[in-house]
Structures are given as structure tokens and as C-alpha cells.
Amino acid sequence: MVAIDAASGDPARIMSDVETKSELRTALWRFVTLAVFAVSVALEPDGGSHPVHLLLLLSYAVTSVTAIGLVAMGIYRPWMNWVYVAVDAALVVYLAAEHMFVPGVGIGEAVSTPSLAIAFVLLAHAGLRMRAGTVAAFAAIVSVGTAAAAAAAVMFGPNAGMPSLDDLRDAGVRAIAFLAVAVFQVLLAIDIRRVVVTAVSSTSERVNLARFFAPSTAERIATDGFQIGLVRREAAVLFVDIRGFTGLAETMSPEELGVLLGEYRRRVVDAVGHWDGTIDKFMGDGVMAVFGLDESRSADAERAFHCACQLVNRLETWSEAMAKAGAEPMTFGIGLHFGPVVGGVVAGGAHGEHTVLGDTVNLAARLQSMCKVLSARLIVSEAILKRLPPAALGEAWRMRRQVEVPGRVEAVDVAFLPLGVLY
């Protein structure tokens, strides 16, 4: 089976890529078929037919080279399969008819010559395209065309007249064998395509889920669906947004705004995924990510911290590059906290939401909003600091004890990276 590259996550595009790769493989196998045809022609006892056979060989070779060229140039289209099938079937019919009009050769002998073994090879070759329709079309054209040629030979050929019982028996056995193989190939093509479509859909679903969830969560949702339910865990929650985004958005066109948000979110998603976190939701220019919801681990806080630091570097490097290009520079705020959360799927009628709830989420969001007050790029809570190695914070970090957080009674101890300080 053709390897599936699911990077795009689009089922239609993935299936198109699968069919294109399959067609390249099918086109290459035409040369194997060509070799089989050449050998069968060489074994023909009647040398007088060789010029016709060589012409057919040449025609098939040209078709094969054309098929490979179309795929290689990227202009192959699925409808072209029908052209190849029609050409291949016409070749078989012509070959059969050519034998039936040889003086002294009966119908049974004509359809049993070595060169007509190519009919079975081409039938199997048609099945490589994973399309039952093309296999059935090939079998139908060959069957009807050969029957018509046989009828014409019986009525108008050099051996006109009612064939002998032996001839009819031989021709009948050959026809039944061909049709039986055709039925098997059709069923096989249907089964193979069903497997490929199922694999493409499953892979595409996992790719799309992996854009928002940690790999283990994405796999679990893809396998079991959104029937995970609410669970209580200890997890790290990260909030990030663009400071002053509302004012910035008012000066940009919708197209420019869409590009900006897309680039920003892509960087956040890449960083969160790199540290095995889960994107919980997008809120305009805000992004919420969680580390440890699917399965709590001792390093959840540390992974979230490293992700936050990486985001600081990535986003500010991006902002500096945009400023050099003449765009308005941006600043970002990131808040990070660790503690108990309740997460999973919350039912909402026809629309369920995978989310995380609790005081930990609220504090992480408020720490992010305090970046403006403290002139900070990143603020982490004491709960995060307790779970970091002793040397995790560098000299650039600042500590602030008993910081009052809007909306909370209890003050908290935090560490933060000030704006304008290299990290």
C-alpha cells in the first residue's frame, strides 16, 4: 500500500496524493507488463504475426512513457485512468481479433495463444489503481470486444462457419477464467480502496487533533471520540496574548490581520506541541495551553516553563524581524501557574467543548494580564518555581513577594522577566 503523508490534515488532498503516488507506481509497472508482453510475443509459433505484435508493443511502450511523464510533470488527473484502460483493453481486443482471422486457426486456439496472456496481466495491472470501475471497464471492453471479434470471424473470416465443440469449449473456459479473475480484482479493488480511505480519514483526524491536543490526548480522542468526561488533575496552565492588540488591529486590513494572527498562532502551537502541551482554546489574540491534563507527570511544570521561555524568544525574534521590515513592533504577555484543574469535555447540546476549569486557570490568566502592570514579558507563580531545578532562573529574572492580583483576596509570590532585559 502507498505510504500516507498526512502533514496537510486535509482528507481530499491526502487522498489525491495517495492516488498520484499509486499512479506513479502503476505507470512504472507498465514496463514489467511490457516485458511480459515481449516474452509472450517471442514465444508465438507464428512468426508472420510478429510485425503486428511489434507495433502493439511500440504503442504500449509509448503509452507507458506518456503515463510516467504526466505523473512526473504533476499534470496527472484521475480521469486519465479511463484513457489508459481503454487503450490497454483495445490492445487486447485487437490482438485477439488478429489471431481469429488467421487462416486455419480456430476460435479456441486463437484465444489460447501465449500473447493473449497479456489480458490477465493487464487486468491485474488495472487493479493497482484501487478503482473497481476501471477494472470492470477493462474486463467489459475486453469481453465484449473479443466476443464481437469472434462473431465477425465466424461470419466473415477465413474460417467462417460454426466452430467445433472443442473450439467452443476452449474459448468458453478461457472466457470464464477471465471473468472470474475480473470479479476477484473488482472485489479486491473495493476492499483496498475502503482500507485506504479509512486510513486517510483516521490519519487526517489525528493530524487535525494533534494541532490542538497533546499526542496522547489526540490519539485518545481519535480512538474513543469526545467521550472522555471531566477529570481532576494537577496541571500547568499558560496564557499568552499580544499586548495592545485591539489598537493594532484597528490599523490593519482584514487580510493583514488574518496573516498576523495566523503567524502568531502557528508559533504558539509549534512551541506548545514541542513541549507536549495541549492548546485548550484560542481567544482572538489570546491562547490558552495546558500541560499535564491528559496524564499528570512530575515534569509538567518544568515543561510548561521551558515552553514559556521559548515563546518569549520566538515571539520577540518575530517582532524584531517585523519591525526591521517596517511593521509595527509588538510586545507579548505570558502568565504561567500550576495547580489543580478540572478538564475534559463539557456537554453543550449539539456542541461539546474540551476545556479546563478552576482557580488555577483563573490565576494563570490574571498573571498574564499583570504583565502590563509589572512591565514584564513572562510572569510565573511560586507554584511553578517550586517545581523547577534550582538553576532554572537566570540573572534576568526578578522576584516579587506578595503581589496583589486583581480579583483575588490572597497575594502571591511571582517571578518575572522584565521588558527590555535580555534573556
Image (cartoon, helix red, strand yellow):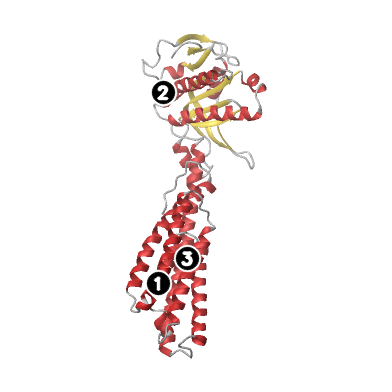
Disc 1 and disc 2 in contact, CB within 8 angstroms: no
Q: Which of the pair 34/222 is nearer the observer?
A: 34
Q: Is residue 227 rendered to the left or right of residue 245? A: left
In terms of sequence position, does the residue under pointer 1 or pointer 2 come before the other? 1
Using the numbered discs, state the Cα–Cα distance from disc 1 to disc 3 in whole angstroms.
32 Å
Q: Residues within 10 Å of mark 3 (few under 14, many from 20)?
A: some
Q: Is residue 222 left or right of residue 251?
A: left
Choose the circle earlier in sequence order: 1 or 3.
1
The picture places residue 326, in percent across and down from the top left corner, at 57, 19
Q: Nearer the viewer, residue 142 or 189?
A: 142
Q: How busy is the neighbourhood of tag 2: few (under 14 within 10 Å), some, or many (20 plus)?
A: many
User: Are the residues tagged 1 and 3 within 8 Å (C-beta)?
Assistant: no
Q: Nearer the viewer, mark 2 or mark 3?
A: 3
Counting from the top left corner in percent of width and height, residue 129 is at 46, 59
Q: Amino acid at mark 2?
A: Glu
Q: Is residue 41 visible?
A: yes
Give the label on residue 302, or none.
2
Label 1 crowd bin: few (<14), some (14–19), many (20+), radius 10 Å = many
Q: Quadrant of the N terminus?
A: bottom left
User: Can you identify the residue that label 1 sits on?
Assistant: 53
Asked if residue 179 shows in the view, the reply is no
- Location of mark 3 (residue): 187
- Identify the amino acid type marked 1: His
Vertical arrangement, residue 139 with respect to residue 360, above or below: below
SS at circle 2: helix
The three-letter code of the residue at mark 3 reads Leu
Say whether disc 2 or disc 3 marks the residue closer to the N-terminus. Answer: 3
Residue at left offset 50%, top offset 22%: 318
